[in-house]
Image (cartoon, rainbow, N blue to C red):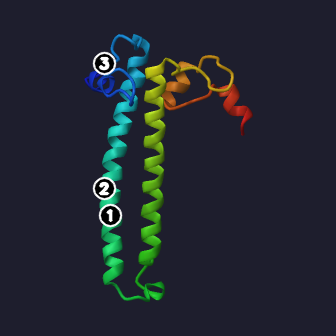
Amino acid sequence: MNDDVPAALDEAPDGAPGDLREAVPDDLREAIAALAAREAELRRQADALEVQLAELVEAAADANADDEHDPEGPTLAFERQQVAAVLESARGELAELAAARARIADGTYGRCESCGGPIAPARLAARPTARTCIACASRTR
């Protein structure tokens, strides 16, 4: 068993019991570990992006006001927007991970939110934050 699993089980969403070990079947432990690992990775990425964004904002304050015509490369505004977009994406995925943890806590993880049927284990392995089964996901496209 992955060493991250106990830590992931202790990090219950708000309003959920602090220790989910008894509530989570053994077959969900791998999903919980995957969620915890991805969340840790995204938090590190988001922290680094926040620092990078702050540096770009500071550089823009100190830079020439006309960086739009800088022949040396992309503008500070472009770089700032690019970093902000990646940061927003990471924050969105963190929210999806938190929602998946909440579904684990309330017992609905692995059930399709559209039809109520089971989500295939292979789908959950590939996409641990999946809310719908493959059939329902295909219909919404």
Taking depth in this image into account, of 69 and 8 the one nearest to the observer is 8
Q: Within 10 Å of the Cα at label 3, are there few (<14), some (14-19), or many (20+) other Cα atoms?
A: some
- Residue 52, disc: 1
Query: Quick one: SS at disc 1?
Result: helix
The type of residue carrying mark 1 is Gln
Quadrant where the N terminus is found in the figure: top left
Name, please, the residue furthest toward the right.
139
Up the image or down, 64 lies above or below 87; here it is below
Disc 3 vs disc 2: which is toward the camera?
3
Query: Quick one: SS at disc 3?
Result: loop
Residue in the picture at 47% in, 30% down: 100
Up the image or down, 51 lies above or below 127; here it is below
Query: Quick one: SS at disc 2?
Result: helix
Residue beneath disc 2 = 48
Taking depth in this image into account, of 17 and 34 the one nearest to the observer is 17
> Mark 2 or mark 3, which is nearer the start of the sequence?
3
Q: How far apart, in angstroms, are the residues tagged by discs 3 and 2?
A: 31 Å
Q: Are marks 2 and 1 in contact (CB under 8 Å)?
A: yes
Q: How far apart, in angstroms, are the residues tagged by discs 2 and 1?
A: 6 Å
Name, please, the residue furthest toward the front.
15
The type of residue carrying mark 2 is Ala
Q: How far apart, in angstroms, are the residues tagged by discs 3 and 1?
A: 36 Å
Up the image or down, 76 lies above or below 102; here it is below
Q: Are marks 3 and 2 in contact (CB under 8 Å)?
A: no
Residue beneath disc 3 = 19
Quadrant where the C terminus is found in the figure: top right
